Image: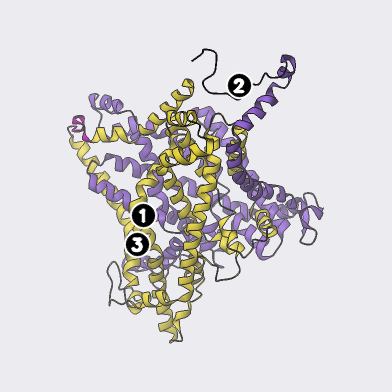
Chain colours: A yellow, B purple
Amino acid sequence: MTTDQIPGRGGARTEERGPRPVASRRRGPGRRMHETGVDRVFLAIVYVLLLTFLAVVLVPLLYILASSFSDPAAVSSGRVLLWPVDFTLRGYQVVLGDAQILTGFANSLFYTVGGTLISVALTVAIAYPLSRTDFPGGSVITRLVVFTMLFAGGVIPTYLVVQSLGMLDTRWALLLPQAVGVWQVIIARTYFRYSIPQELVEAAEMDGASDLRVLWSIVLPLAKPMLAVIALMYAITQWNSYFDALLYLKSDDLYPLQLILRNILILNQQGGGLGDTQALEHQQLADLLKYSLIVVSTVPVLLIYPFVARYFTKGIMIGAVKG
Amino acid sequence: MVSGVPLVPGPTAGAKGPPRPIRRQNAGWAAARRSIRRRWQLYLLVIAPLAYFAVFKYVPMVNAVIAFKEYSVVRGVWGSEWVGLEHFRAFFENPVFWTLVRNTFLLSAYFLIASFPIPIILALALNEIRQELFRRTVQLVTYAPYFISTVVVVSMTILILSPRIGLVDETIGFFGISSVDFLGDPDYFRHIYVWSDIWQTAGYSAVVYMAALAGIDPSLYEAARVDGASRLQKIIHVDLPGIMPTAVIVLILGVGNIMAIGFEKAFLFQNPLNLGQSEIIATYVYKTGLLNADFSRATAVGLFNSAINLVLLVAVNRVAKRVTGSGLW
């Protein structure tokens, strides 16, 4: 019992070792090195480098945003750079009035919410027993799970399974075949093993709580940050995926947004709302539609991102502590 | 309380137990049965996820035997006739074989080499900045493209590079260079693929190194300061050795994935004009397998790819373990 506790606590401590020294290094009195001339030049180079990084990432984003608000003629004649020219909302009117795009949005929302719930439930269900040192057979199961990361049957053999289960062209095909990520199982298992105080679990068992009761009432409430991390990972993957839909779906009323985006943006299949305009104007409007569509489909994710970024960072760190 | 009476009735409490010799014989089984009875709820939890791995991961591995068969829809995986290595032989003799292997390998190798140092440079540079606001801004912005979907990143790239309306075309036009059809010229495919990916993931990948840098023992910095190290010397002698184990792991994983280069993106960037360099094993599998319904041959090609991948991963892991003492397993 006590021997179990020691590695458990040690683990928790190593994990916290991450952020702490940085804070002390930044705020502590030792921080104020006296800077030599060489150092100042070096620091200036660092700033220039980072500003370059910043610009390289930002300019394309701003260009797309500016173009989406500009007159199509101005965009195609190259007058738009980072600020809208001849402001218009026509692209957005078309995008938001398109039934196909709206269906795609609704479908993606469904797949993301439903898929994330299924994925998190299954991940917890396997990660918790595997995190217990007193779970016989755990190491065999862990090996079986990790092996699927190294070797896979392939696209066609998986397709045959989905087909034989009768899931082709149903919503299940997007929810189940990719439901559990091995990486997420490892993150969850590590967290359960090293970050949940073992004393609490033992106390609950002493009081007669069953394993399921301990998981539900003690472990899960304590694991909320980790649950948020893996839920986000699953949600982002689900929201962004298009390949499974391409493989398994035929009816376009089941298509997720990304597949519809691919059809319009990359294969140039127009959305419904464009009507019959003159060829050139049609082409220009189609381009404008693309810019607006990119903005509309990306902004929701980018708006949420600053609020969830720190969870993501935490997730990477949890994953990096021990694989 | 009388001594000798257990406070908590254990599983064996009360039971006399079978005579010793038998017990020793079946000790393993008895222990297993006892622990299963005690831990049944844990086993219950594991059933559904295990079923998932069995059905969606292990059954496909078994299904992969169709690579050695002539798959017939009517007769199913087991009823189909064995043809041995016929499909592999046909693939190796196909003139497209070397093009596919070359394209896959070159794309991955280029990707690996180009995408490895940039997150490290970004993390080291961010680590030098003490001005919180600037540092946080750069981090937040460079991290953001990771959240943009592959489809959107590819379409943004296509729009920006397009000779008709593109931003890049305007820019190089300003310097007097005539317009280039980046996506129609196969020679540009690899650069576009690799650099758009770096644009999307460098900020995200840097986080791992930031975490490693944060874990470096502060006393090492103190020591470096006492010795009068400059910022650059401190990076070379403290930061770089500090992130080395992380970098090794990232590199191993990268090499292990060298043949598994992303299908999704290559497929999106493909067009009839750039197929000469953009057709990789994964896209070929999709096309022969699902579009031409040649299940057996596509599976053979995919299996060949996975096998190379596995061999590479095992080999690199062994080398890394010998050289640095740390590997994946």
Question: Is residue B289 shown in magenta?
Answer: no
**Label ID, residue A305:** 1
Chain under callout 3: A
Q: What residue type is labelled 2?
A: Ala
Could one spot residue B251 in this view of the protein? no
The residue singled out by tag 3 in the image is A61
x, y percent for residue B217? 33, 28
**Label ID, residue B13:** 2
The reply, left or right, for residue B55 in relation to residue A188 is right
Chain under callout 1: A
Q: Name the residue nearer the viewer: B94 or A158.
A: A158
Question: Is residue A30 shown in magenta?
Answer: yes
Could one spot residue B128 in this view of the protein? yes
Q: How far apart are marks 2 and 1 (CA)?
A: 55 Å
Q: Which residue is drawn at 56% across and 59% down?
A: A174
Residue B31 lies, with reference to residue A170, above or below; the image says: above
Outermost residue toward the top? B3
| Magenta region, residue range | A27-33
Dot 2, how many residues are within 10 Å of its Cα: few (below 14), some (14-19), or many (20+)?
A: few
Residue B115 lies, with reference to residue A10, above or below; the image says: below
Outermost residue toward the front? B1
Dot 3, how many residues are within 10 Å of its Cα: few (below 14), some (14-19), or many (20+)?
A: some
Describe the element under mark 1 as helix, strand or loop. Answer: helix
x, y percent for residue A277? 43, 86
The reply, left or right, for residue A230 in relation to residue A32 is right
Q: Which amino acid does label 3 sit on?
A: Leu
- Single out the mark in the foreground, 2 or 3: 2
Do marks 2 and 1 share a subunit?
Answer: no
